[in-house]
Amino acid sequence: MVMKHYPPEFKADAVALYESRPEATIKQIAADLGVNPETLRNWIRDAGVSRPRGRRAAAPPAVPVAPSALEAEVAALRRENAELKKEREILRKAARYFASGDGLVNRCQFVEDHQRRYGVKRLCRILGIARSSFYHWRRTAPLRAARQAADARLAARIRAIHRASDGTYGVPRITAELREDGEVVNHKRVARVMQAIGLAGLRLRRKHRTTIPDPAAAKVPDLIGRNFTATEVNTKYVGDITYLPLAGGSFRYLATVIDLCSRRLAGWAIADHMRADLVVDALKAAERTRDSLAGAIFHTDHGAQYCSRAFAEACREAGVTQSMSAVGSSADNALAESFNATCKRETLQGRRAWDTEREAHLDLFRWLHRYNTVRRHSRLGHRSPIAYERALRTTSTTLAEAA
């Protein structure tokens, strides 16, 4: 029944019906009568009729309240339990991301990979990162990708240089090599990339005593005084003997003559003995390299070979003045000893000994020549000794022409 104007009797009956049925709602009664619920509500309000709240239910008011509160608590506990299960599930999956690398980056990567399933807000809360940090990480992803690609290219070049140096070069020399090839790179970045790819230079090994002083030898003054520098080539030299271990417990011995200006190995000799002939042969080799050693100083320790008459005579014939460190003081001939340590470290490559004498000889032959022509020296601005001497000659010629 649809009317625009309802008679007063109809309105009064409708209100009475509402009042007589406390279990029914205004909407239900309005539907039964075919009137608008708001219209019926207005009639009830105009009539001043109200029904007690407790008339709808026969049970006491407190009875339905308790089950409702309990159900709400159970529902809340179920929601909390479901959330905890989700968190455990998320943390189990996230554990695989934290095996290595930067922790913050790993967390951000996990959020990126699982955001569609769990949502960014929930993942950031569980993993303990700010959403702003995650969004910043995502915005800078292209820059990181470019940097990673650049590091990968740099790593390939570092591996090549490290391999070419027989695995001996560390950060400073590899940095110098890269810069000479035109790479603009910081040594800290080289160190970081080398650490990431597991590369490192060789380190010093334990020393073995080869210096046996002769108490009866004539005293020779120390003309170097631990000043292992020279302004010109072929003016000051240092030398020493070092052992070369072979399998089975035998040894070969290397004697050296090193220029203090350019650090060039001017002469060397290898033998199966430590007699005076060994150091005399090394001195004669240096004389052949320089054409003449006249006027030069040759500094050594007080080993019996260097105190021998044969070596003193060889020095007089070459025009060389002998200089010797204090007895028992390795620091007085530190440069020569450092050279020996580097030589064995970079040729033995962590081994205790060479298998054969031939293997030792060929390894030394290759390394000693590479030392002069290729290997970079920190004291020389990461240039090889021969390259340094060549630069000195060029500078001297330029100054002479300018004068």
Image (cartoon, rainbow, N blue to C red):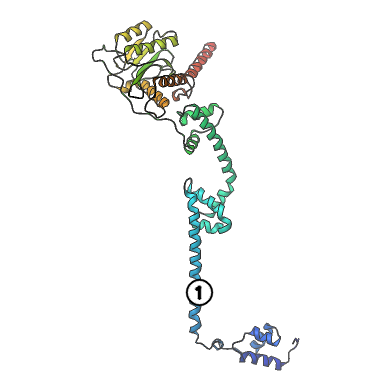
From the image, which quarter does the N terminus lie in?
bottom right
Q: Secondary structure at mark 1?
A: helix
Image x and y of residue 205, in percent: 36, 28
Q: Amino acid at mark 1?
A: Ala
Q: Quadrant of residue 257?
A: top left
226 vs 39, left or right, is: left
347 vs 40, left or right, is: left
Badge 1 is on which residue? Answer: 72
51 vs 367, left or right, is: right
Q: Is residue 296 visible?
A: no
Q: Is residue 77 visible?
A: yes
Q: Residue at x 57, y 39 (%)?
A: 149
Image height of 177 relative to 143, above or below = above
Image x and y of residue 314, in percent: 35, 8
Image x and y of residue 164, in percent: 50, 27
The answer to which of 301 and 269 lies nearer the viewer is 269
Image height of 125 relative to 184, above or below = below
Image height of 47 relative to 298, above or below = below
Question: Of all residues shown, which one is farthest toward the top?
Answer: 317
Q: Residue at x 67, y 93 (%)?
A: 13
Question: Of all residues shown, which one is farthest toward the bottom?
Answer: 9
Image x and y of residue 217, in percent: 26, 12
Q: How many marks?
A: 1
Image height of 159 relative to 139, above or below = above
